[in-house]
Amino acid sequence: LDGEAAKALPLPDTWSAAGLATLSFGQGVVVTPLQILVSDIATINGGKLLAPHIVKEIRYSDGRVDKTQPNIIRQVISSETANKLQAMLTSVVENGVAGSAKVKGYYVGGKTGTAQVADPKTGKYSADKKIISFFGFAPADKPQFAVLITLDNPKGLSFASGTAAPMFRELATKLLSYYMIAPNRK
């Protein structure tokens, strides 16, 4: 897509010790929301990295339908690791800071995020600019959709748990109803 970063992550053999540490929590790297979403989906998709697509299907006037099929790029983590991560992401909502993402009648999973923004004038991270995000999916045990909400430098807002996570809850509630997905919790 227009504006996507071509090379977002330096090659591992170029990482310094400090670079490895900061990369572990997302600093020192430039990624787009689509790249984040694609990588996060691998954690709830058995570790398979899928090529993103925009068009679900093409319907022709003669009745033919060409459906876009999932394109697996490669296995990026084991299915066992993906299952553990999926459980951890569910725990973030059930027991952690993202409780405001809970959807009545469903187990959902997700992760909050806050990214510092580099100041091009100083070359350092800005003291007052940030990107707040929430990645969420539902139902947690068999995800049917995933969403990434990002808020770019929201004024007066500090944490995803009180902003982007409740936005996910509202959207997920509507999507679960729209897709007629049965509740998975009492």
Image (cartoon, rainbow, N blue to C red):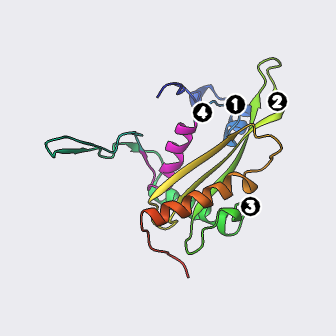
Most extreme residue toward the left is: 62
The Cα–Cα distance between marks 2 and 4, rounded to whole angstroms, is 18 Å
The Cα–Cα distance between marks 1 and 4, rounded to whole angstroms, is 10 Å
User: In terms of sequence position, does the residue under pointer 2 or pointer 1 come before the other?
Assistant: 1
The Cα–Cα distance between marks 3 and 1, rounded to whole angstroms, is 25 Å
In the rendered view, tell whether residue 182 sits above or below residue 54: below
Disc 4 crowd rating (10 Å Cα; few below 14, some 14-19, many 20+) is some
Residue 97 disc label: 3
147 and 175: which is toward the camera: 175
Q: Residue at x 50, y 75 (%)?
A: 184
Residue 29 % position (x, y): 65, 31
Helix, strand or loop at label 4? It is loop
* Residue placed under numbered mark 2 in the picture: 126
Q: Which residues are magenta?
A: 33-49
* Residue placed under numbered mark 4 in the picture: 31
Single out the mark in the foreground, 1 or 4.
4
Residue type at mark 3: give it: Val
Residue type at mark 2: give it: Ser
Residue 28 disc label: 1
Residue type at mark 4: give it: Val
Residue type at mark 1: give it: Gly
Helix, strand or loop at label 3? It is loop
Disc 1 crowd rating (10 Å Cα; few below 14, some 14-19, many 20+) is some
Q: Residue at x 83, y 19 (%)?
A: 122
Query: What kind of secondary structure does the magenta stretch mostly adopt?
Result: helix
In the rendered view, tell whether residue 89 sits above or below residue 1: below
Q: Residue at x 54, y 26 (%)?
A: 5
